[in-house]
Image (cartoon, grey):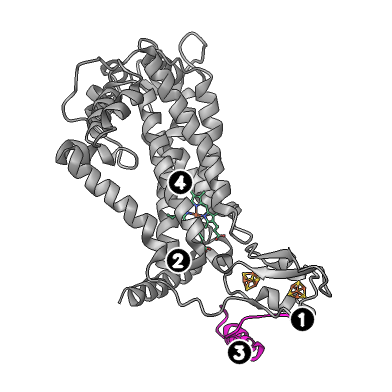
Amino acid sequence: MYKKFLSLTKSLTVSLEKGLNFLTTQEHNPLYFHGAMPLYCFWFLIFSGIMLWMYYIPTLDRAWSSVNYITSLPVVQQVVNKQGQTIWQTAAISEATGIPYGAVVRGIHRWGAAGMMITTLLHMFRVYFTDRHRSWRWLPWVSGVLLLVILLFTGITGYLLVWDARAYAMVVSTQAWLRAIPAIGGWMAEFFTGGDIRDYTLTRFLFFHVGGASFLFWLIWMHFIRLHEPVVTPSRATNFLTFGFILVAAGAIPAINVTEELIKQYPTLAAQKDFIASDAPAQIGMIVQNMRYDAWYMFPYYLIERLGPVLAWIILGGSTILLFVAPFYPKDRRDNIAEVLDAKCTGCTFCSLDCPFEAITMQERAPGSKFKLIAVVQAARCSECGICVGSCPFQAIDLPNTHSKTIEADVLALLKTGA
Ligand code: HEM
Ligand code: SF4
Ligand code: SF4
Protein backbone atom coordinates (compact mmCIF):
# COMPACT_ATOMS: atom_id res chain seq x y z
CA MET A 1 0.00 0.00 0.00
CA TYR A 2 2.72 2.46 1.08
CA LYS A 3 4.92 1.34 -1.82
CA LYS A 4 1.99 1.95 -4.19
CA PHE A 5 1.63 5.45 -2.72
CA LEU A 6 5.35 6.11 -3.35
CA SER A 7 5.17 4.87 -6.93
CA LEU A 8 2.12 7.08 -7.54
CA THR A 9 3.87 10.18 -6.11
CA LYS A 10 6.91 9.29 -8.21
CA SER A 11 5.01 9.21 -11.50
CA LEU A 12 3.11 12.42 -10.59
CA THR A 13 6.35 14.26 -9.72
CA VAL A 14 8.09 13.12 -12.90
CA SER A 15 5.05 14.20 -15.00
CA LEU A 16 5.02 17.60 -13.28
CA GLU A 17 8.73 18.05 -14.02
CA LYS A 18 8.28 17.00 -17.63
CA GLY A 19 5.34 19.43 -17.95
CA LEU A 20 7.49 22.27 -16.64
CA ASN A 21 10.09 21.46 -19.30
CA PHE A 22 7.70 22.95 -21.90
CA LEU A 23 7.95 26.30 -20.11
CA THR A 24 11.56 26.31 -18.99
CA THR A 25 13.31 23.77 -21.23
CA GLN A 26 15.07 20.79 -19.70
CA GLU A 27 18.27 22.76 -19.21
CA HIS A 28 16.73 25.43 -16.97
CA ASN A 29 13.97 23.52 -15.18
CA PRO A 30 14.39 24.69 -11.54
CA LEU A 31 12.97 21.39 -10.28
CA TYR A 32 16.06 19.64 -11.67
CA PHE A 33 18.18 21.78 -9.32
CA HIS A 34 16.19 20.99 -6.20
CA GLY A 35 19.34 20.13 -4.20
CA ALA A 36 21.48 22.94 -5.58
CA MET A 37 19.02 25.75 -4.80
CA PRO A 38 19.24 25.58 -0.96
CA LEU A 39 23.03 25.63 -1.32
CA TYR A 40 22.82 28.68 -3.59
CA CYS A 41 20.67 30.51 -0.98
CA PHE A 42 23.18 29.47 1.70
CA TRP A 43 26.00 31.36 -0.06
CA PHE A 44 23.91 34.55 0.04
CA LEU A 45 23.28 34.01 3.74
CA ILE A 46 26.99 33.58 4.49
CA PHE A 47 28.05 36.75 2.64
CA SER A 48 25.19 38.98 3.84
CA GLY A 49 25.57 37.55 7.37
CA ILE A 50 29.27 38.48 7.52
CA MET A 51 28.38 42.03 6.43
CA LEU A 52 25.68 42.36 9.11
CA TRP A 53 28.05 40.91 11.73
CA MET A 54 30.45 43.83 11.17
CA TYR A 55 27.94 46.26 12.68
CA TYR A 56 25.99 44.11 15.13
CA ILE A 57 26.52 44.86 18.85
CA PRO A 58 25.46 41.93 21.08
CA THR A 59 24.43 43.82 24.23
CA LEU A 60 20.95 44.28 25.70
CA ASP A 61 20.88 48.05 25.23
CA ARG A 62 22.65 48.22 21.84
CA ALA A 63 21.50 45.12 19.89
CA TRP A 64 18.16 46.53 18.68
CA SER A 65 19.61 49.95 17.88
CA SER A 66 22.62 48.45 16.07
CA VAL A 67 20.25 46.44 13.84
CA ASN A 68 18.14 49.56 13.39
CA TYR A 69 21.23 51.56 12.51
CA ILE A 70 22.15 49.06 9.80
CA THR A 71 18.72 49.41 8.18
CA SER A 72 17.56 52.89 9.19
CA LEU A 73 18.19 54.29 5.75
CA PRO A 74 15.94 52.90 3.06
CA VAL A 75 17.43 53.59 -0.34
CA VAL A 76 14.64 55.91 -1.53
CA GLN A 77 12.47 58.34 0.41
CA GLN A 78 9.51 60.68 -0.18
CA VAL A 79 10.31 64.43 -0.15
CA VAL A 80 8.51 67.67 -1.09
CA ASN A 81 10.37 69.51 -3.87
CA LYS A 82 10.64 73.28 -4.45
CA GLN A 83 7.39 73.25 -6.44
CA GLY A 84 5.55 71.73 -3.49
CA GLN A 85 5.16 68.32 -5.15
CA THR A 86 5.75 65.08 -3.24
CA ILE A 87 8.36 63.02 -5.07
CA TRP A 88 10.55 59.96 -4.43
CA GLN A 89 14.28 60.51 -4.40
CA THR A 90 17.40 58.57 -3.53
CA ALA A 91 18.14 59.10 0.14
CA ALA A 92 21.35 60.90 1.07
CA ILE A 93 23.82 58.39 2.42
CA SER A 94 25.98 59.23 5.36
CA GLU A 95 27.71 57.22 8.06
CA ALA A 96 25.93 59.34 10.66
CA THR A 97 22.44 58.21 9.63
CA GLY A 98 22.94 54.57 8.77
CA ILE A 99 24.82 52.00 6.75
CA PRO A 100 24.57 52.54 3.00
CA TYR A 101 22.28 49.88 1.53
CA GLY A 102 22.14 48.16 4.93
CA ALA A 103 18.41 47.56 4.45
CA VAL A 104 19.14 45.71 1.21
CA VAL A 105 21.78 43.53 2.86
CA ARG A 106 19.47 42.73 5.77
CA GLY A 107 16.67 42.05 3.28
CA ILE A 108 18.88 39.60 1.39
CA HIS A 109 19.73 37.89 4.68
CA ARG A 110 16.08 37.68 5.81
CA TRP A 111 14.62 36.60 2.46
CA GLY A 112 17.61 34.42 1.63
CA ALA A 113 16.82 32.54 4.86
CA ALA A 114 13.18 32.16 3.80
CA GLY A 115 14.39 31.04 0.34
CA MET A 116 16.70 28.45 1.89
CA MET A 117 13.90 26.96 3.99
CA ILE A 118 11.44 26.93 1.07
CA THR A 119 13.93 25.32 -1.35
CA THR A 120 15.10 22.82 1.31
CA LEU A 121 11.50 21.70 1.87
CA LEU A 122 10.95 21.49 -1.88
CA HIS A 123 14.10 19.37 -2.17
CA MET A 124 13.02 17.11 0.69
CA PHE A 125 9.57 16.51 -0.85
CA ARG A 126 11.18 15.91 -4.26
CA VAL A 127 13.48 13.16 -3.01
CA TYR A 128 10.70 11.66 -0.87
CA PHE A 129 8.05 11.69 -3.59
CA THR A 130 10.43 10.16 -6.14
CA ASP A 131 11.35 7.42 -3.63
CA ARG A 132 15.02 8.40 -3.63
CA HIS A 133 15.38 8.35 0.10
CA ARG A 134 15.37 4.70 1.12
CA SER A 135 17.80 1.83 1.27
CA TRP A 136 21.48 2.82 0.64
CA ARG A 137 20.39 6.49 0.41
CA TRP A 138 19.66 6.55 4.14
CA LEU A 139 22.76 8.68 4.90
CA PRO A 140 21.84 11.65 2.68
CA TRP A 141 18.30 11.46 4.04
CA VAL A 142 19.23 11.26 7.73
CA SER A 143 21.90 13.98 7.37
CA GLY A 144 19.23 15.97 5.47
CA VAL A 145 16.79 15.76 8.39
CA LEU A 146 19.60 16.97 10.68
CA LEU A 147 20.25 19.81 8.22
CA LEU A 148 16.59 20.79 8.42
CA VAL A 149 16.66 20.83 12.25
CA ILE A 150 19.89 22.87 12.40
CA LEU A 151 18.59 25.23 9.71
CA LEU A 152 15.52 25.87 11.85
CA PHE A 153 17.69 26.41 14.93
CA THR A 154 19.98 28.82 13.05
CA GLY A 155 16.99 30.79 11.71
CA ILE A 156 15.37 31.06 15.14
CA THR A 157 18.59 32.21 16.83
CA GLY A 158 19.00 34.78 14.03
CA TYR A 159 15.62 36.29 14.87
CA LEU A 160 16.63 36.44 18.56
CA LEU A 161 19.61 38.65 17.70
CA VAL A 162 17.32 41.53 16.65
CA TRP A 163 16.33 41.72 20.32
CA ASP A 164 12.89 43.16 19.70
CA ALA A 165 9.66 42.34 21.58
CA ARG A 166 9.22 39.23 19.41
CA ALA A 167 12.71 37.96 20.26
CA TYR A 168 11.98 38.35 23.98
CA ALA A 169 8.64 36.49 23.63
CA MET A 170 10.48 33.71 21.76
CA VAL A 171 13.05 33.41 24.56
CA VAL A 172 10.26 33.07 27.15
CA SER A 173 8.41 30.46 25.01
CA THR A 174 11.63 28.52 24.33
CA GLN A 175 12.38 28.34 28.04
CA ALA A 176 8.85 27.09 28.81
CA TRP A 177 9.25 24.55 26.00
CA LEU A 178 12.62 23.30 27.27
CA ARG A 179 11.39 23.11 30.88
CA ALA A 180 8.71 20.65 29.71
CA ILE A 181 11.50 18.06 29.10
CA PRO A 182 11.62 15.69 32.07
CA ALA A 183 14.79 15.65 34.24
CA ILE A 184 17.12 17.87 32.16
CA GLY A 185 14.59 20.51 31.02
CA GLY A 186 15.36 23.01 33.80
CA TRP A 187 19.09 22.80 33.09
CA MET A 188 18.54 23.22 29.34
CA ALA A 189 16.37 26.32 29.86
CA GLU A 190 19.15 27.82 32.04
CA PHE A 191 21.82 26.87 29.49
CA PHE A 192 19.85 28.48 26.67
CA THR A 193 20.10 31.98 28.17
CA GLY A 194 23.10 31.41 30.47
CA GLY A 195 20.98 32.11 33.58
CA ASP A 196 19.44 35.58 33.94
CA ILE A 197 19.02 37.48 30.71
CA ARG A 198 22.00 39.85 30.40
CA ASP A 199 24.56 40.99 27.82
CA TYR A 200 26.18 37.54 27.74
CA THR A 201 22.82 36.06 26.73
CA LEU A 202 23.04 37.88 23.41
CA THR A 203 26.70 36.89 22.99
CA ARG A 204 25.49 33.31 23.48
CA PHE A 205 22.71 33.73 20.88
CA LEU A 206 25.28 35.11 18.43
CA PHE A 207 27.45 32.06 19.12
CA PHE A 208 24.44 29.74 18.55
CA HIS A 209 23.62 31.51 15.29
CA VAL A 210 27.13 31.58 13.81
CA GLY A 211 27.89 28.13 15.28
CA GLY A 212 24.67 26.74 13.73
CA ALA A 213 25.60 28.15 10.30
CA SER A 214 29.12 26.66 10.56
CA PHE A 215 27.69 23.29 11.60
CA LEU A 216 25.49 23.42 8.47
CA PHE A 217 28.67 23.49 6.39
CA TRP A 218 29.94 20.30 7.99
CA LEU A 219 26.55 18.62 7.64
CA ILE A 220 26.36 19.54 3.96
CA TRP A 221 29.70 17.75 3.48
CA MET A 222 28.25 14.69 5.29
CA HIS A 223 25.20 14.97 3.08
CA PHE A 224 27.28 14.78 -0.11
CA ILE A 225 29.85 12.21 0.96
CA ARG A 226 27.93 9.22 -0.41
CA LEU A 227 26.31 10.90 -3.40
CA HIS A 228 27.75 10.37 -6.82
CA GLU A 229 28.51 13.73 -8.48
CA PRO A 230 25.75 15.69 -6.73
CA VAL A 231 24.33 18.59 -8.78
CA VAL A 232 25.51 21.54 -6.67
CA THR A 233 25.19 24.47 -9.10
CA PRO A 234 21.82 25.54 -10.51
CA SER A 235 21.61 26.63 -14.15
CA ARG A 236 22.27 30.32 -14.80
CA ALA A 237 18.56 30.99 -15.37
CA THR A 238 17.66 29.30 -12.07
CA ASN A 239 20.30 31.40 -10.30
CA PHE A 240 18.83 34.62 -11.71
CA LEU A 241 15.31 33.50 -10.85
CA THR A 242 16.20 32.63 -7.23
CA PHE A 243 18.23 35.79 -6.67
CA GLY A 244 15.48 37.82 -8.40
CA PHE A 245 12.89 36.47 -5.95
CA ILE A 246 15.11 37.29 -2.97
CA LEU A 247 15.75 40.86 -4.22
CA VAL A 248 12.09 41.54 -5.10
CA ALA A 249 10.97 40.23 -1.70
CA ALA A 250 13.65 42.33 0.02
CA GLY A 251 12.37 45.41 -1.84
CA ALA A 252 8.63 44.73 -1.44
CA ILE A 253 8.71 43.74 2.24
CA PRO A 254 11.92 45.31 3.58
CA ALA A 255 13.57 43.76 6.61
CA ILE A 256 13.39 46.76 8.93
CA ASN A 257 12.11 47.42 12.45
CA VAL A 258 8.71 48.97 11.70
CA THR A 259 8.18 51.95 14.04
CA GLU A 260 5.60 54.79 14.19
CA GLU A 261 8.29 57.29 13.10
CA LEU A 262 9.28 55.20 10.12
CA ILE A 263 5.66 54.92 8.93
CA LYS A 264 5.29 58.72 9.20
CA GLN A 265 8.40 59.12 7.09
CA TYR A 266 7.54 56.36 4.59
CA PRO A 267 3.72 56.11 4.33
CA THR A 268 3.97 53.08 2.01
CA LEU A 269 5.07 51.08 5.06
CA ALA A 270 1.62 51.64 6.64
CA ALA A 271 0.55 48.22 5.34
CA GLN A 272 2.98 46.74 7.87
CA LYS A 273 1.72 48.68 10.88
CA ASP A 274 0.75 45.45 12.67
CA PHE A 275 4.44 44.80 13.16
CA ILE A 276 5.03 47.90 15.31
CA ALA A 277 4.50 46.18 18.68
CA SER A 278 6.45 43.04 17.69
CA ASP A 279 9.30 45.11 16.22
CA ALA A 280 9.73 47.48 19.19
CA PRO A 281 12.85 47.06 21.36
CA ALA A 282 12.60 44.16 23.85
CA GLN A 283 11.66 44.98 27.42
CA ILE A 284 12.42 42.26 29.90
CA GLY A 285 9.22 41.16 31.68
CA MET A 286 6.91 42.63 29.01
CA ILE A 287 5.17 40.23 26.61
CA VAL A 288 3.38 41.86 23.67
CA GLN A 289 0.01 40.40 22.64
CA ASN A 290 -0.76 39.25 19.06
CA MET A 291 2.87 38.70 18.12
CA ARG A 292 3.61 38.70 14.37
CA TYR A 293 5.53 35.53 13.61
CA ASP A 294 7.44 34.49 10.48
CA ALA A 295 5.94 31.36 8.86
CA TRP A 296 9.17 29.61 7.88
CA TYR A 297 11.14 29.67 11.10
CA MET A 298 8.74 30.66 13.87
CA PHE A 299 5.95 28.11 13.35
CA PRO A 300 7.05 26.20 16.51
CA TYR A 301 6.07 29.29 18.52
CA TYR A 302 2.51 29.22 17.18
CA LEU A 303 2.31 25.64 18.43
CA ILE A 304 3.91 26.36 21.82
CA GLU A 305 1.63 29.35 22.43
CA ARG A 306 -1.61 27.83 21.10
CA LEU A 307 -1.25 24.20 22.26
CA GLY A 308 1.20 24.42 25.16
CA PRO A 309 4.77 23.05 25.43
CA VAL A 310 3.87 19.37 25.89
CA LEU A 311 1.63 19.08 22.81
CA ALA A 312 4.17 21.13 20.82
CA TRP A 313 6.84 18.56 21.79
CA ILE A 314 4.60 15.70 20.73
CA ILE A 315 3.88 17.25 17.32
CA LEU A 316 7.37 18.61 16.53
CA GLY A 317 9.34 15.77 18.16
CA GLY A 318 7.00 13.12 16.69
CA SER A 319 7.30 14.48 13.14
CA THR A 320 11.11 14.72 13.44
CA ILE A 321 11.30 11.06 14.57
CA LEU A 322 9.03 10.03 11.67
CA LEU A 323 11.34 11.87 9.26
CA PHE A 324 14.42 10.16 10.73
CA VAL A 325 12.97 6.66 10.35
CA ALA A 326 11.37 7.26 6.91
CA PRO A 327 14.26 5.72 4.88
CA PHE A 328 14.09 2.43 6.78
CA TYR A 329 10.52 1.56 5.85
CA PRO A 330 9.49 -0.38 3.82
CA LYS A 331 12.68 -2.39 3.69
CA ASP A 332 13.81 -3.10 0.13
CA ARG A 333 14.63 -6.63 -0.94
CA ARG A 334 18.40 -6.21 -1.34
CA ASP A 335 19.01 -9.24 -3.50
CA ASN A 336 21.31 -7.75 -6.11
CA ILE A 337 24.33 -6.56 -4.14
CA ALA A 338 27.61 -6.95 -6.01
CA GLU A 339 29.47 -10.18 -5.30
CA VAL A 340 33.17 -10.86 -5.76
CA LEU A 341 34.26 -14.25 -7.11
CA ASP A 342 37.28 -14.90 -4.89
CA ALA A 343 39.00 -17.28 -7.28
CA LYS A 344 38.96 -14.77 -10.16
CA CYS A 345 39.83 -11.55 -8.32
CA THR A 346 43.42 -10.46 -8.99
CA GLY A 347 43.24 -7.47 -6.63
CA CYS A 348 43.76 -4.99 -9.47
CA THR A 349 41.65 -2.33 -7.56
CA PHE A 350 39.79 -1.10 -10.72
CA CYS A 351 36.34 -1.77 -9.27
CA SER A 352 37.21 -0.07 -5.99
CA LEU A 353 38.40 3.06 -7.82
CA ASP A 354 35.31 3.15 -10.07
CA CYS A 355 32.59 2.47 -7.49
CA PRO A 356 30.82 5.85 -7.07
CA PHE A 357 29.56 4.94 -3.60
CA GLU A 358 32.83 3.82 -2.04
CA ALA A 359 31.28 0.43 -1.44
CA ILE A 360 34.37 -1.64 -2.36
CA THR A 361 37.44 -1.83 -0.16
CA MET A 362 40.63 -3.69 -0.98
CA GLN A 363 41.76 -6.10 1.72
CA GLU A 364 44.91 -8.20 2.22
CA ARG A 365 44.58 -11.87 1.26
CA ALA A 366 45.89 -14.61 3.52
CA PRO A 367 49.72 -15.06 3.36
CA GLY A 368 50.83 -17.40 0.62
CA SER A 369 47.87 -16.57 -1.71
CA LYS A 370 48.51 -16.10 -5.41
CA PHE A 371 47.36 -12.44 -5.29
CA LYS A 372 48.06 -9.90 -2.58
CA LEU A 373 44.66 -8.14 -2.42
CA ILE A 374 40.99 -8.98 -2.77
CA ALA A 375 37.97 -6.71 -3.36
CA VAL A 376 35.33 -6.73 -0.60
CA VAL A 377 31.87 -5.22 -1.07
CA GLN A 378 30.23 -3.38 1.85
CA ALA A 379 26.63 -4.40 1.37
CA ALA A 380 25.08 -1.38 3.16
CA ARG A 381 26.75 1.03 0.72
CA CYS A 382 26.16 -0.87 -2.51
CA SER A 383 23.49 0.75 -4.69
CA GLU A 384 23.38 -2.24 -7.04
CA CYS A 385 24.36 0.08 -9.91
CA GLY A 386 26.58 -2.46 -11.69
CA ILE A 387 29.42 -0.06 -12.57
CA CYS A 388 31.99 -2.38 -10.97
CA VAL A 389 30.86 -5.20 -13.24
CA GLY A 390 31.92 -3.10 -16.21
CA SER A 391 35.22 -2.06 -14.60
CA CYS A 392 36.47 -5.56 -13.84
CA PRO A 393 38.73 -6.88 -16.61
CA PHE A 394 38.58 -10.40 -15.12
CA GLN A 395 34.82 -10.91 -14.77
CA ALA A 396 35.44 -11.33 -11.07
CA ILE A 397 32.54 -9.24 -9.79
CA ASP A 398 28.87 -9.60 -10.65
CA LEU A 399 25.35 -8.59 -9.68
CA PRO A 400 23.81 -11.96 -8.86
CA ASN A 401 20.37 -11.15 -10.29
CA THR A 402 21.18 -8.90 -13.22
CA HIS A 403 22.88 -10.41 -16.18
CA SER A 404 24.45 -8.41 -18.96
CA LYS A 405 21.59 -9.34 -21.34
CA THR A 406 18.99 -7.89 -18.93
CA ILE A 407 21.02 -4.70 -18.53
CA GLU A 408 21.31 -4.34 -22.31
CA ALA A 409 17.54 -4.73 -22.72
CA ASP A 410 16.90 -2.17 -19.93
CA VAL A 411 19.25 0.37 -21.52
CA LEU A 412 17.62 -0.07 -24.94
CA ALA A 413 14.13 0.34 -23.45
CA LEU A 414 15.23 3.54 -21.66
CA LEU A 415 16.76 4.92 -24.84
CA LYS A 416 13.49 4.27 -26.67
CA THR A 417 11.42 6.20 -24.09
CA GLY A 418 13.96 9.06 -24.25
CA ALA A 419 14.40 9.02 -20.42
C1 HEM B 1 20.80 22.62 3.62
C2 HEM B 1 19.95 21.89 3.01
C3 HEM B 1 20.27 20.90 1.90
C4 HEM B 1 21.15 21.00 0.86
C5 HEM B 1 22.05 22.19 0.53
C6 HEM B 1 21.05 19.77 0.10
C7 HEM B 1 21.74 19.51 -1.05
C8 HEM B 1 21.62 18.34 -1.80
C9 HEM B 1 22.21 18.13 -3.11
C10 HEM B 1 23.02 19.15 -3.91
C11 HEM B 1 21.90 16.86 -3.48
C12 HEM B 1 22.26 16.19 -4.82
C13 HEM B 1 21.04 16.35 -5.72
C14 HEM B 1 21.30 15.85 -7.13
O1 HEM B 1 22.43 15.51 -7.45
O2 HEM B 1 20.32 15.84 -7.91
C15 HEM B 1 21.14 16.25 -2.43
C16 HEM B 1 20.64 14.96 -2.44
C17 HEM B 1 19.83 14.42 -1.46
N1 HEM B 1 19.26 15.09 -0.39
FE1 HEM B 1 19.70 17.00 0.15
N2 HEM B 1 20.15 18.94 0.70
C18 HEM B 1 19.63 19.59 1.81
C19 HEM B 1 18.64 19.14 2.67
C20 HEM B 1 18.05 17.89 2.59
C21 HEM B 1 16.95 17.45 3.40
C22 HEM B 1 16.26 18.30 4.45
C23 HEM B 1 16.69 16.15 3.03
C24 HEM B 1 15.67 15.20 3.58
C25 HEM B 1 15.25 15.18 4.80
C26 HEM B 1 17.61 15.78 1.99
C27 HEM B 1 17.68 14.53 1.40
C28 HEM B 1 18.47 14.22 0.30
C29 HEM B 1 18.53 12.90 -0.32
C30 HEM B 1 17.82 11.62 0.14
C31 HEM B 1 19.38 13.03 -1.43
C32 HEM B 1 19.77 11.92 -2.44
C33 HEM B 1 18.80 12.00 -3.59
C34 HEM B 1 19.27 11.25 -4.82
O3 HEM B 1 20.22 10.48 -4.74
O4 HEM B 1 18.64 11.50 -5.85
N3 HEM B 1 18.41 16.87 1.73
N4 HEM B 1 20.97 17.19 -1.42
S1 SF4 C 1 27.18 -2.29 -7.81
FE1 SF4 C 1 29.39 -2.13 -7.67
S2 SF4 C 1 29.87 -0.06 -8.33
FE2 SF4 C 1 27.69 -0.10 -7.87
S3 SF4 C 1 27.58 0.53 -5.72
FE3 SF4 C 1 27.65 -1.71 -5.71
S4 SF4 C 1 29.80 -2.16 -5.48
FE4 SF4 C 1 29.69 -0.01 -6.10
S1 SF4 D 1 38.18 -5.19 -10.78
FE1 SF4 D 1 37.79 -7.37 -10.62
S2 SF4 D 1 39.81 -8.26 -10.37
FE2 SF4 D 1 40.05 -6.09 -10.00
S3 SF4 D 1 39.83 -5.94 -7.76
FE3 SF4 D 1 37.80 -5.63 -8.61
S4 SF4 D 1 36.88 -7.67 -8.62
FE4 SF4 D 1 39.04 -7.93 -8.32
Specify the quadrant of the image occupied by residue 169.
top left
Residue placed under numbered mark 4 in the picture = 147
**Quick check: marks 2 and 1 in contact, CB under 8 Å?**
no
Mark 4: is the Cβ under 8 angstroms from ligand 1? yes
Q: Secondary structure at mark 3?
A: helix
Label for residue 406? 3
Q: Is mark 2 within 8 Å of ligand 1?
A: no
Q: Residue at x 36, y 56 (%)?
A: 323
Q: Find residue 45 and report its horizontal and vertical position in percent.
A: 51, 36
Query: What is the C-alpha distance between the residues marked 2 and 3?
Result: 24 Å
Disc nearest the viewer among 2 and 4: 2
Report x, y in % for residue 125: 40, 59
* Residue at image coords 52%, 65%: 136
Helix or strand or loop: what does disc 4 sit on? helix
Three-letter code for the amino acid on which mark 3 is drawn? Thr
Instruction: Depth check: give the residue in front, 336 or 76.
Output: 336
Q: Which residue corresponds to the image point at 19% horizontal and 17% vertical from the top-left?
A: 286
Is residue 49 inside the magenta stretch?
Answer: no
Query: Which mark, residue 344?
Result: 1
Mark 1 crowdedness (10 Å alpha carbons): few <14, some 14-19, many ≥20: few
User: Is the residue 165 above or below the residue 154 in the image?
Assistant: above
In the image, what residue type sits under mark 1?
Lys
Q: Earlier in the sequence, mark 2 or mark 4?
A: 2
**First to last magenta residue range:** 396-419
Please tell me which residue lies in front, 141 or 87.
Answer: 141
What's the residue type where badge 4 is placed?
A: Leu
Q: Is residue 51 shown above or below 4?
A: above
Q: Is residue 110 left or right of residue 258?
A: right
